[in-house]
Image (cartoon, grey):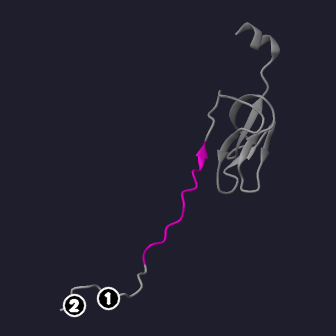
Amino acid sequence: MAHKKGLGSTRNGRDSNPKYRGIKKFGGEKVIPGNIILRQTGTRWHPGLNVGLGRDYTIFSLVEGVVKFERHGKDRQKVSVYPVSVEAAVAA
């Protein structure tokens, strides 16, 4: 009986890196331009007002404001960013 394992190749040892998808900023949270709101595969969430859609379907903010998740039609969801008014910011 051999007391060392043969030096054959193994078929294991590969694993893909995690993609960290999902919602990063929830409804009501304040964002600044460039903040990533969510990462997704395909357009599960569609871009609304004041947001951009990246090449990998990442939705990000284009303006400073508050995130809002909305329904768009019967079965479509969209994400928008609404700017905070100056009066509301001063009052807070």
Residue type (three-letter) at the residue carrying disc 2 = Ala
Membership of 29 in magenta stretch: no
Task: Estimate the x, y position of residue 43 in percent, counting from the top left.
Answer: 70, 53
Question: Badge 1 is on which residue?
Answer: 6
Residue 92 vs residue 34, the one in the foreground: 34
Task: Estimate the x, y position of residue 37 in percent, counting from the top left.
Answer: 68, 40
Q: Quadrant where the N terminus lies?
A: bottom left
Residue sitting at x 79%, y 25%: 83
Within-10-Å neighbours for mark 2: few <14, some 14–19, many 20+: few
Asked which secondary structure carries label 1, the reply is loop
Residue sitting at x 80%, y 11%: 87
Q: Is residue 70 above or below residue 28?
A: below
Task: Estimate the x, y position of residue 14 in percent, counting from the top left.
Answer: 48, 71
Task: Estimate the x, y position of residue 60 in percent, counting from the top left.
Answer: 74, 42
Asked which secondary structure carries label 2, the reply is loop
Q: In this view, does 16 lie above or below 57?
A: below
Q: Is residue 66 left or right of residue 14?
A: right
Residue 35 vs residue 27, the one in the foreground: 35
- In the figure, residue 65 lies in which quadrant? top right
**Contact flag, marks 1 and 2 (Cβ < 8 Å):** yes
Question: Badge 2 is on which residue?
Answer: 2
Q: What stretch is highlighted in magenta?
A: 12-23
